[in-house]
Amino acid sequence: MSITIRTDSRSEAEPPPSVGWKSIQDFMRPMFFIPVVAGFTGGFWYPLLPAWSDATHINAASLNFLNSISFLAMVVMVPIFSALGDRYGHRRLLTMTISLTAIGFVLITVAPGFAVAAIGNSLWSAQSASIGLLIGLVRDKEKGARANRTIALLATGITVGSLIGVQSAGPIMSLFGGNARLPLLVPAILLVVCALISQFLLSESTTRADRPIDWIGSIGLSVGLVSLLVGVMNANSAGWTSLSTLGLSAIGLVVLVAWVKWERRTPAPLINLDVVTSRAMWPAMLAAAMFGAILYVPKTPVLTFLAAKPESVGYGFGFAATAISIVLTCFYLMDILGSSVYALIAGKIGARGVLVAGIGCGTVGLASTAILAHAGSTAWAFTLGFMTIGLGTGLLHGSMPAYISEAAPADQVAVISGTYFTVRGVGGTIGTAMAGAMLAAFTPAHATSPTETGYSAVWLFCAAASVVSLLLMILSWFRRRPPTTAPRTVY
């Protein structure tokens, strides 16, 4: 696979005259607003989710399928928009992804039911590509340590925005008289502002890649995953052994097999499968898919469980949006704590040790959440279990990419790191679909809410995935060949 770069004749050490440090500072100030809003949209959405689902008459199982659709769209959109940005300009595609996200939020606001909400969630997934496009802009303007600091600042902006969103969701909903729809126009308006900032205040990148877009691979991955996902969703109503369920699943598997063959043959694949399936990498990538299930699946069931009214369904705590915001804040703070102490811990026990610690915390948190939910615990004990999951995911946020990049060949670290996020998204897609199927299976006839056993089953499923991911990582440690050169130290 070859990539041709078109650029000007100036030496890379000599920046264009218009890009001095003051210009870069001016460039970064409006840019920083975009990741803050990206974090805000996710943080703002989750506290409103239970009330919004009541307003749209979408039950807990269907909410998980909405998440599955979002992750599926993310898996497809991120590599496509990233490739388009490399070829046609990062700012141009950044404006497009932000605009699609704004449209998605408007559709979610007015959605009369599942179908329109699914379209809105799919468009919202375009936001997942915006951070990669922002990083492309930064790399085009600056190099080395200064660029790394700026990229770290963008990542910090997402966390800051998430905390602001979580804290403001409840008060803003109160301002709208408890309406769960109208507050969603707030992130939509902020996204419109971001689109204007991107279009008129950011300068376009100058580097272009001539690599062709793998449209066939994109379509194949989309059709294959959609068929499998719809097959799982169809199993809830038609049964796992029904002709329609088996037929859709078979179509998905056949298309994915054909997609694998195509990706191995095409010179510019959507995902470099030769690297992903190499002896050193496949256990780690499969573990990354498991991490996607651990990371994305538990959150929505936790929120709907917190909001469930004991007098109506026999479980839950009846939390309003403000109380859910507080719980989410505690979760995010533990996630930030885990990410922050990664470098300190890795210096003592290495990336592998942090990875084991993260998986251990996640497993303990998931198992305790499942047990506490079934045993009818207090809200404080349940929240503590949820916070333990947050600490585990924070540690994994730092250790998993570090381990993946360390295990990768020295000349393919960037490719492997990008593939890791895609594989993690696939794991989240499949995991949320299976979680939705489990919740639907534990929903009694003519009822809209699953039993508490259904929730516990989902969290135990995630705990099992967590243990499997650890076993896969251990397998990869034993199967890796000794390095031919001095090993890289990753912190």
Image (cartoon, rainbow, N blue to C red):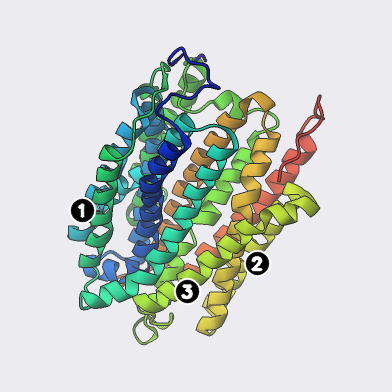
Residue type highlighted by circle 1: Leu
Q: Are marks 1 and 2 in contact (CB under 8 Å)?
A: no
Residue type highlighted by circle 2: Val
Residue type highlighted by circle 3: Val
Name the residue beneath numbered marker 2. Answer: 364
Q: Which one is earlier in the sequence, the residue at label 2 or at label 3?
A: 3
Name the residue beneath numbered marker 1. Answer: 107
Q: Is residue 280 visible?
A: yes
Give residue 29's position: percent from left, percent from top: 39, 47
Name the residue beneath numbered marker 3. Answer: 327
Q: Which one is earlier in the sequence, the residue at label 1 or at label 2?
A: 1
Q: How many residues crowd mark 3 within 10 Å: few (<14), some (14–19), many (20+)? A: many
- Compared with 390, 226 (above or below) is above
Q: Which one is earlier in the sequence, the residue at label 1 or at label 3?
A: 1
Which residue is rendered at x = 67% and y = 59% of the image? 341
Mark 3 falls on what kind of element? helix
Which residue is rendered at x = 58% and y = 66% of the image? 334
- Compared with 292, 40 (above or below) is below
The residue closer to the viewer here, 416 or 63, is 416
Q: Is residue 245 visible?
A: no
Q: Quadrant of residue 325?
A: bottom left
Give residue 420's position: percent from left, percent from top: 56, 39
Q: CA distance from mark 1 to mark 2?
A: 38 Å
Count of marks, rendered view: 3
- Compared with 196, 408 (above or below) is above
Q: How many residues crowd mark 1 within 10 Å: few (<14), some (14–19), many (20+)? A: many
The residue closer to the viewer here, 290 or 334, is 334
